[in-house]
Image (spheres, rainbow, N blue to C red):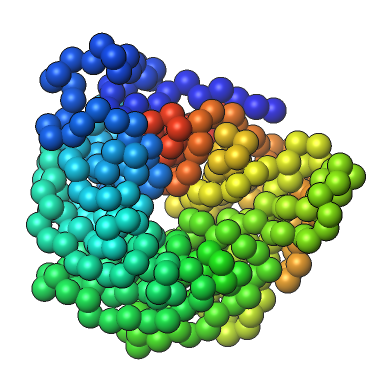
Amino acid sequence: MRYSVLARLMVPALLLSGLALAADRAGQRADDQPEGVAEAHRSPVALALSADGGRLLTANQGSGTVSLVDTKVGKVLFEQTTGAKPAGVAFSRDGRRAVVTHWYGSNLAILDVGADRFEVVGRVNVGPEPRGVALSADGATAYVAVGVANEVVRVDCVDQKVSGRLTVGREPRGVALSADGRQLLVGNGRGQSLSVVSTADWKVERTVPIDGANLRQVVIADDGLTGYVVNMRNRGFATTRNHIDLGWVLGQRLTRIRLDSADDDFETLSLDPQGEAAADVYGLALSPDGQRIAVSSAGTHEIFLITSGPKSLPWRVNNSRDLIAPELLKDDRFRRIAVGGRPTELAFSPDGRTVYIANTFADAVQVLDPETGK
């Protein structure tokens, strides 16, 4: 079953009575336009939610800006140019510091965040093509995936300098920091692997091959025991109608590994129903209780909601099915919600009742109720 999205935050726009009302760009008033920002498609690709859920930041790749959103009233409070092609954002736990990477700028910008605006207070060169970023709870340390260098770079946000470099797999892209700050999970976009980094020892504890490529957003469960990533699997068969129908060409996967184990096992859920496959999975978020998983399928303009419980999910160890497990199509544990545009990164609210979606082609942050699918 598919559901329509009834609410979204246009960037910039207002959310009123649960329905987005966006001014036509040609007729937008001057006072609607953020100061110092030229009219442009914002094209948000990444987002970060504050720990209390009250503020949200978006990395707007098209306009080179970051937007600060009040999620309670559905209003863009402030937007400012930060650099070339913003790619990743992260918040400190108290919401007073944030960081943004610039894919084309080779740098990390440090932001001081107030109640209704932010200020760029520093900039650190980290290397070519930085994307994913994670920030320690106290806002003192940032961890940046620097793709061309095949490195994770540690940045001291107080002294505003690089404090460490660590080689990981090929073209790291997504990073996630455990709640206790002790482990960093790195998705190696072209390395077909996940690297587990000890932040205290500043070393790669292990790199887990996962039989998947094009790794995007990665997350760590709140209990710190499991790491997740969405990825593509290239089956290597000829591109024929029959092979496509059987899931033998390209497949979309949700993959997880144990972080409290020294083994190299991985588990997968295939996401492709026969005849109506997923495409270009990108974003990933876990509800705080771990019972819901949200995945964005950017190529089919959808959000997948996967529920674990009361039945366990049919994970497959060190391999994957060609197509989605049939049992997931027989109940509400797997739902597809059409959202339009190109949904990219995702975040659950602290209470688990809302999923926020960065939608690049819609120039929007969409607001999804995972209970109703609206």
Dividing the picture into quadrants, the one containing residue 4 is top right
* Residue occupying image coordinates x 42% and y 67%: 147
Q: Position of residue 127 (x, y in %)?
A: 31, 70
**From where the camera sits, is residue 124 visible?**
yes
Note whether 149 is above or below 367 in the view shown.
below
From the top left corner, tell me how far across and down residue 228 is, in percent.
55, 62
Residue at position x 28%, y 14% from top? 26
Answer left or right for 87 relative to 226: left
Disc tally is: 0
In which quadrant is the N terminus drawn? top right
- Residue 345, position as x, y percentages in the image: 45, 46
Q: Residue furthest top?
A: 27
Residue shown at 19% from the left, 43% from the top:
81
Question: Up-down: is 368 above or below 16?
Answer: below
The answer to which quarter of the image holds residue 65 is: top left
Which residue ends up furthest to the right in the rendered image?
242
Q: Does residue 127 lie above or below 88 as drawn?
A: below
Q: Position of residue 356 (x, y in %)?
A: 41, 39
Q: Residue at x 37, y 19 (%)?
A: 20
Task: Judge from the rendering whether residue 325 lies leftward or rightward of residue 209; answer left or right.
Answer: right
124 is higher (above) or lower (below) than 72: below
Give the left or right position of residue 272, taking residue 162 as reference: right
Q: Is residue 48 visible?
A: no
Is 187 on the left-hand or right-hand side of 238? left
